[in-house]
Amino acid sequence: MKRIPAISALAAAFAAAFSHQPAQAAFVLIDNFDSLVPGALHNQGGWVANDSGTNWSVAPSPAGGQGNVAVSTGLTVTQRAYKLFPQAIPLDSTAATLFFRVYRSGPVNLSAGVTNNPSGGLFDLYKTQLNAQHNLTPTDSFKVRDASAFDDLGAGSFANETWYNVWQVINWSAKTYEIWIDAGNFGEPVLAQTHILDPNGGAGDFTFAFRNTLLDSNPLNAAIFTYGNTTPALTGQFIIDDIYIDIAGANLNNPVPEPGTAILGGAGLLGLLMRRRRK
């Protein structure tokens, strides 16, 4: 029998490993910032920043990330940055998914979500809104906007210098959304994806209402991220990366590749093949 050369075994092993990676069906990349130049984010890659780029910038990722990220640092002026979707979420949609990764270094006042009026008011424009307000207690939590109020997810839900994967599953027709969160570095498998329970709702209530119903004849068309001003100003860094949209449904796959898993799988297969050669 003809034996496979080592280089062919390596190629076959890696092909097999990658072929078993979970499909990231229907997710479309909005931005991972790797093709942008370090410096002001405004006017790069379709991004618009209300401060003309003074406080939103492109920079290398902190530990646990990869490539470039978008970063904002708190001052006394609210700063937002947004980018239009390649295709808007239709008005009759009952499920679409925004995915992004978020990280902080120090206390922050942040908001992240979707809008159908990105150039409108700084906060009233939000439909879905993941939030943190570390000028208030607890100073290490996420909040989720539920109609006219913020629901706090509890102390420790937004740890410092920790990456979080976030899925916002949006029901545009019902004007509601649900959130899943999983802590993890770039390339790590999803291990503890948590469906966020409304802390002020009853058992089994995972639904949050849109912040507003303004301009509801307009389709949802942009991802938006805001660093809110406080007095005194918070000085932590608010970091965003790996933003994806799936306008076709609820998609709880992680669209960020898992190279470590594939490489280890390929190496294991290669070792098995090499052991078989030596027999």
Image (cartoon, grey):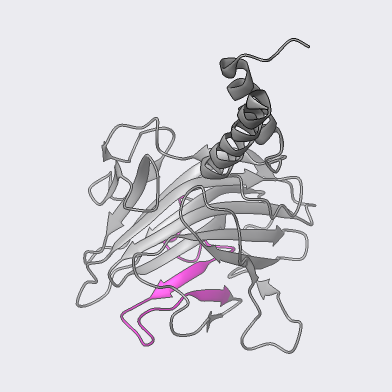
- 1 above or below 154? above
Give how far across and how far down residue 194 sits, in percent: 63, 70
What is the tally of numbered marks visible in this picture?
0
Image quadrant occupied by the C terminus:
top right
Q: Which residues are magenta?
A: 119-145
Please state the horizontal and vertical placement of residue 31, each as a whole percent of the image: 48, 39
Q: In the image as oriented, which residue stretches furthest toward the front?
A: 279
In front: 57, or 155? 155
Magenta-span inclusion, residue 127: yes
> Quarter of the image holding residue 276?
top right
Is 76 rendered above or below residue 157?
Answer: above
Residue at 63% of width from left, 74% of height from top? Answer: 196
Determine the residue positioned at 48% across, 43% down. Answer: 83
Which quarter shows the N terminus?
Answer: top right
| Secondary structure that dominates the magenta span | loop
Measuring 61% from the left and 14% from the top, which residue is drawn there?
5
**Front one among 192 and 115:** 192
Residue 19 image position (x, y, % from top left)? 70, 33
Q: Nearer the viewer, residue 80 or 185?
A: 185
Res 86 seen here: no
> Magenta segment: does it hold 111?
no
On the question of residue 186 being in view, the answer is yes
Residue 40 occupies quadrant: top left
Q: Does residue 44 lie above or below 176 as drawn? A: above
Q: Residue at x 21, y 64 (%)?
A: 75
Give the answer, above or below, for where 48 lies relative to 95.
above
Q: Position of residue 54 (x, y in %)?
A: 22, 48
